[in-house]
Image (cartoon, rainbow, N blue to C red):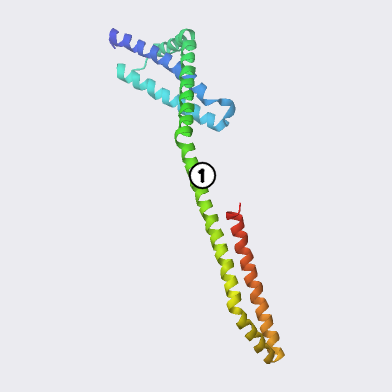
Amino acid sequence: MSLSTQFYTMLAMVGMGSFFGASLDTYQRFLKRGSRHNIIVFLNDILFWLLHGVIIFYVLFLVNFGEIRFYLVLAILCGFAAYQALIKGIYLRILEGIISFFKATWSFIQKLFLILIYRPIKGMVLLLFSILLGIGRIVWMLVKGIGIVLLWIIKIIGYPFTLLAKGILMLLPKSWVTTIQRLFHSTKNILNRMIRFVQGIIRKYFSK
C-alpha cells in the first residue's frame, strides 16, 4: 500500500473505532439487559458483533481493498479510546435529547389523535347509539300501546266465541274436556314463557 492509502486506512479505522464506541453505547441504551431474557441478550450480542465486523471490513475494503494489518487493530482501539475519553459524554447527552424529543413527539401525536380523531368519533358513535336507543324505546311504547288496544278489541270480539266454546265443552264427554283443558294449559304455559322471554329482552335493552 502507498503512504496515502495507509494514511486514509488509519483515519478510516480510527473513525470506525469511534463509530463502534457510539454504536455500542446506543446498543446498550436500547437493549436494557436487566429486563431481557438471557437468550435474547445473547442473540442480540452475536448479531451486533457480526454486523459491526461486516461494516468494518466493508469500510476497509473501500479504502485499501480489504488488506488487513496489525496496526489497523491498534487504530480501531485508538478510535474507541478517543471516543471514550472525548466524545462519549457529549454523544450520550445528544442521544438522550434525541430520545426525549421522539418520546415527546410521539406523546404529542397520541394526544392529538385522541383529541381530533378518537374522541369525536367516540362521541358521534355514542350519540348515534343514544338516538337509536331512544327511537327503539318510542317504537316499543307504540307497539305496546297498540298491543294493549288490540288485546282489548280481541277480548270484545272473542267474548261470544268464548261463550260458544264453553257451551260446546259442556256437551262433550268429560274425557274429551279434560284432554282439551290439558292441551290448552300446556299451550298457554308455552306462550307465557315465550312472552316473558321477549319481555325480559325488551326490558334489558329498551327500558333502561
Which amino acid is tagged 1? Leu
Direction from residue 42 to residue 1 in the image, left or right: left
Q: Position of residue 75 (x, y in %)?
A: 41, 11
Residue at 60 percent of width and 59 percent of height: 201
Residue 162 visible within the image: yes
Query: Viewer-proximal residue, 15 or 28?
Result: 28
Quadrant that contains the N terminus: top left
Q: Position of residue 178 (x, y in %)?
A: 70, 85
Residue 66 lies in quadrant: top left
Direction from residue 74 to residue 202 in the image, left or right: right
Q: Which residue is mark 1?
A: 126
Residue at 61 percent of width and 62 percent of height: 199
Q: Position of residue 36 (x, y in %)?
A: 57, 30
Query: Viewer-proximal residue, 205 or 64?
Result: 205
Residue at 50 percent of width and 40 percent of height: 123
Residue 66 visible within the image: no
